[in-house]
């Protein structure tokens, strides 16, 4: 397992280096925005990562609630993975907000605007920070059930937040991908998009697997401590 | 015969909560005074003679209601923790949702009473002059109150087992409540200023209520019996 992680780490670094090289030197600058547009490759890759890891968090939370009484071992694994994926998702969300803010400053001339996508992403970030806070402040085994419930609430809230803020006001450009017949970016830029998505997802999976392993070890240690306190001392 | 004569569990919970509140009047007094303080503080923070303030009175009203509800929601389950009442309720054959709905209805009635007392004071302090259709406020405010109470009672039950639960409740409730607050503020502002049509926001608030009431009812049993 350790060897596999090291190999994965080396491959991730390689793909990220290649992604950086392609994004910075190979693909042409944007027709209207120039070199500033190259931040898009990092901005978009972090949203892909965020979408993936928050979805994993939801699936793990539902799995935990479904199997917690019949298959405790599987439930524990699901809970550790839910924690790891929520944390990595928040990291991606933060990177996306920061790169978006930098890009907005260069192109729109402002750091931040209360536009639907920005607002709903910010609220999403707040919801998952609240989820992580709940995990820290609630105690013992009930915490896992409560956190799983909170994760489902958070995920249900996201589309509602998005719709409500869309009626409120709009500034962010229309979706770049899958947004209609004339959406999408020039074919010459696609290599940079693919390399960076692949590289950053590999990086996220690596960090999530490390975090998952440590969270799982914490749970096992907690269980052992609970067992020991039940046993009669000689 | 006995089944027909038995009072439904929801009504038993509702009557119990209202009776306790009627005898002590703790939450109602605290909520009312707190909402009054928020109204006073906002009118000091914003200049009340400013003609543009008219645009923000709806927002101030909603935020005052929200803070008042928050101060009471922290105590919603505290009563049940004394003498292990909550453990006893877990063991009764009434379903968890009966307890939940009873609790929500009791607090909804309470907050509505506070709002009815607060409304004339609010009109006086802010020289409120509703330009749009005032009767629509009678739809918006109860819908917003329901959204606040249904989520608030649920998250209060969720945070009951944590350390520092008074601190945790607003932290987890407010992010979830944001879209409802937005809809509530937008529709009250639209009604007070008469500048736009609030129907879209009222529909959105109704949809929010339906979705979150359903999710709360589906998950409350899990939260109440979250022992592992």
Image: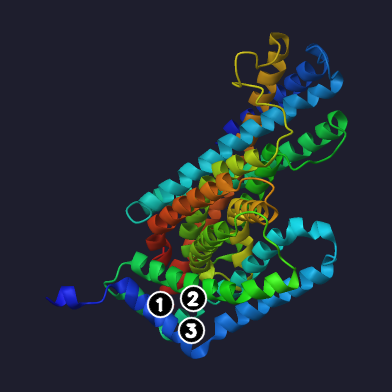
Quarter of the image for residue B111 reads bottom right
Q: Is residue A80 visible?
A: no
The earlier-in-sequence mark between 3 and 2 is 3
Identify residue for label 3: B21
Mark 1 and mark 2 lie on one chain; the one further toward the N terminus is: 2
Residue A61 — which label?
none
From the top left corner, tell me how far across and down residue B128 is, in percent.
71, 65
The residue at 54%/63% (across/down) is B145
Q: Which residue is mark 2?
A: B77
Q: Secondary structure at mark 3?
A: helix
Q: Residues within 10 Å of mark 2 (few under 14, many from 20)?
A: some
- A81 up-or-down from A170: above or below: below
Q: Residue at x 53, y 86 (%)?
A: B25
| Distance from the alpha carbon under mark 3 to that under mark 1 | 18 Å
SS at mark 2?
Answer: loop
Q: CA distance from mark 3 to mark 2?
A: 13 Å
Task: Check disc 1 and report the residue beneath it.
Answer: B86
Image quarter hosting the C terminus of chain A? bottom left
Callout 2: residue from which chain? B
User: Quick one: A116 or A16, which is closer to the camera?
Assistant: A116
1 vs 2, front mark: 2
Give B25 or B159, whichever is nearer the viewer: B25
Viewer can see residue A117: yes
- The chain under label 3 reads B
> Which sits in the foreground, B100 or A189?
B100
Task: Classify residue A91 by image quadrant.
Answer: top right
């Amino acid at each position: 397992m350790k060897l596999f992680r090291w190999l994965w780490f080396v491959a991730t670094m390689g793909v990220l280096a290649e992604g950086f090289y392609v994004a910075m030197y190979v693909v042409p600058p944007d027709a209207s925005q120039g070199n500033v547009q190259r931040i898009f490759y990092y901005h978009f890759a972090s949203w892909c990562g965020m979408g993936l890891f928050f979805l994993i968090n939801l699936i793990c939370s539902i799995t935990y609630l479904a199997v917690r009484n019949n298959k405790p071992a599987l439930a524990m694994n699901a809970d550790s993975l839910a924690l790891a994926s929520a944390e990595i998702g928040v990291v991606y969300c933060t990177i996306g907000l920061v790169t978006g803010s930098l890009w907005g400053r260069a192109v729109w001339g402002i750091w931040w605007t209360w536009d639907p996508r920005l607002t709903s992403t910010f609220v999403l970030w707040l919801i998952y920070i609240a989820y992580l806070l709940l995990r820290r402040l609630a105690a013992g085994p009930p915490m896992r059930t409560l956190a799983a419930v909170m994760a489902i609430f958070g995920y249900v809230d996201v589309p509602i937040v998005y719709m409500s803020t869309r009626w409120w006001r709009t500034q962010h450009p229309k979706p770049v991908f899958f947004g209609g017949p004339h959406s999408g970016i020039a074919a010459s830029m696609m290599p940079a998009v693919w390399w960076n998505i692949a590289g950053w997802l590999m990086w996220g999976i690596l960090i999530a697997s490390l975090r998952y392993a440590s969270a799982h070890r914490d749970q096992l240690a907690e269980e052992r401590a609970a067992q020991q306190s039940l046993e009669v001392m000689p | 015969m006995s089944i027909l004569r038995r009072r439904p569990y929801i009504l038993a919970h509702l009557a119990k909560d209202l009776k306790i509140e009627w005898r002590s009047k703790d939450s109602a007094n605290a909520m009312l005074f707190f909402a009054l303080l928020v109204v006073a503080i906002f009118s000091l923070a914003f200049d009340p003679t400013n003609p543009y303030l008219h645009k923000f009175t709806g927002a101030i009203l909603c935020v005052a209601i929200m803070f008042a509800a928050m101060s009471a929601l922290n105590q919603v389950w505290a009563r049940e923790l004394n003498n292990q009442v909550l453990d006893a309720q877990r063991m009764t054959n009434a379903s968890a949702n009966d307890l939940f709905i009873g609790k929500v209805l009791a607090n909804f009635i309470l907050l509505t009473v506070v709002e009815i007392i607060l409304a004339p004071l609010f009109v006086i302090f802010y020289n409120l002059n509703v330009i749009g259709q005032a009767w629509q406020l009678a739809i918006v405010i109860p819908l917003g109150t329901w959204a606040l109470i249904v989520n608030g009672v649920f998250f209060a039950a969720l945070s009951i087992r944590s350390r520092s639960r008074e601190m945790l409740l607003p932290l987890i409730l407010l992010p979830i409540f944001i879209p409802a607050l937005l809809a509530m503020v937008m529709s009250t502002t639209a009604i007070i200023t008469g500048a736009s049509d609030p129907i879209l926001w009222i529909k959105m608030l109704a949809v929010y209520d339906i979705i979150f009431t359903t999710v709360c009812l589906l998950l409350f049993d899990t939260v109440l019996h979250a022992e592992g």
